[in-house]
Image: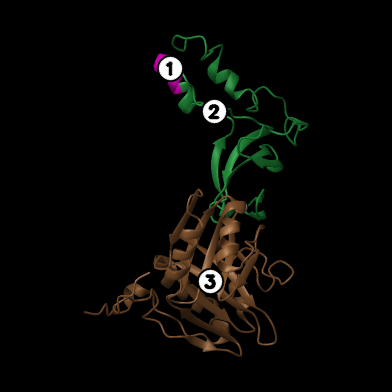
Amino acid sequence: MLLIPCPYCGARDQTEFGYGGEAHRARPTDSDRMSDAQWAHYVFMRKNTKGVFAERWVHAAGCRKWFNALRNTATDEILAVYRMGEPPPGGFTDGLPTPAGEPAIGSGNDGSTVALGAFDPGAGGDRP
Amino acid sequence: MSTDPRRRSPLAHRQPIGTADTLHLSELPFWGLLSVRGDPVAVGLAVREVLGIDLPGAVKATAGAGGVTALWQSPDEWLLVTEPGREGEVQARLTDALAGRHHQLVDLSDYDTIITVAGPAARAALAKLIALDLHPRALAAGQAVSTLLAKATVRLWLVQDGEAGPAFRLIVRRSHADYVWCLLADAGRQWGLPPQEPIGRVPLDIGA
Ligand SMILES: [Zn+2]
């Protein structure tokens, strides 16, 4: 169970919060010109970061405000919380790939690269 | 607010249980509850003008004057708790004072009810159901906080604390009220509270 520091209420039990997934995903402004594959990429594809990850939380049973957090997904350590609309604070690095220090390849660190290959959603056309 | 004589409180089928020298539960029906939202400065000016209250600006803080208490809910939201029957008058005066300012003012009196949990064992009984730290250093008399009690969202308000033990008010949703009541009775078994049958198993007289 995580103890999550709400920026407005202080540290509270994880049961009071809802999870909002990856933060800082801007909705495309030219969706009428996007291919189905590009739209699907925006709607469904998320990073699967092992390490420092920016994500959204809502303090559902408390102040009911949304906010952003930087969490190390390998250790569950919450490194920072900041308000919606603010950029993520810098200065946080992953450190070891995991507490056990296993190699990047095959450990999930390369998951999104493997899944997407060379596909660039901005280049147009369908995924190879 | 309703003035219909058939108005029925969410826990009208319950009687107070327990004793004041250990643990005591009762409902405070029909208290006025107004949610006010908006810019803290603009809303704060109106509330000070109408009620003489400086809106609390931080988590857990409350402020009261003249029988009305403002509970901090979020950086732009407060819950005004009034004695029964006063919410309409307070709402009307606040509406006038807030005219032309962006705000939201909603009467929630029929949406929630209040359960009092009082007596020397009140803190220990609530600690069985609430994960939050209830020690006086974390929640002092006059403070209030929104949290979870088992699966229900509640506003927990410690009205006073002293020789007779703490007196809490739990502001709970109408549809959660009986669930919370039964859980509190269970939590109080060791201090002599009688078991309470959940509402679905109680013949409910809904009146004519
Ligand atoms: Zn909060």
- Residue at image position (57%, 62%) is B47
Judge whether A126 appears above or below B150 on screen. above
Chain letter for the green colouring in the rendering: A
N-term-proximal mark, 1 vs 2: 1
| Residue A64 appearing in the image | yes
Which quarter of the rendered picture does the C terminus of chain B lie within? bottom left
What stretch of residues is rendered in magenta?
A31-40
Which quarter of the rendered picture does the N terminus of chain B lie within? bottom left
Label 2 residue SS: loop
Residue B127 shown in magenta: no
Real-space Cα distance between discs 1 and 2? Answer: 14 Å
Going by the image, does A89 lie left or right of B181? right
| Residue A22 percent coordinates (x, y) | 57, 33
Q: Which mark is residue A46?
A: 2
Are discs 2 and 3 less than 8 Å apart at CB? no
The residue identified by callout 3 is B170
Identified by mark 1, the residue type is: Ala
Identified by mark 2, the residue type is: Arg
Going by the image, does A102 lie left or right of B53? right
Real-space Cα distance between discs 2 and 3? Answer: 41 Å
Real-space Cα distance between discs 1 and 3? Answer: 51 Å
| Residue B205 percent coordinates (x, y) | 27, 80
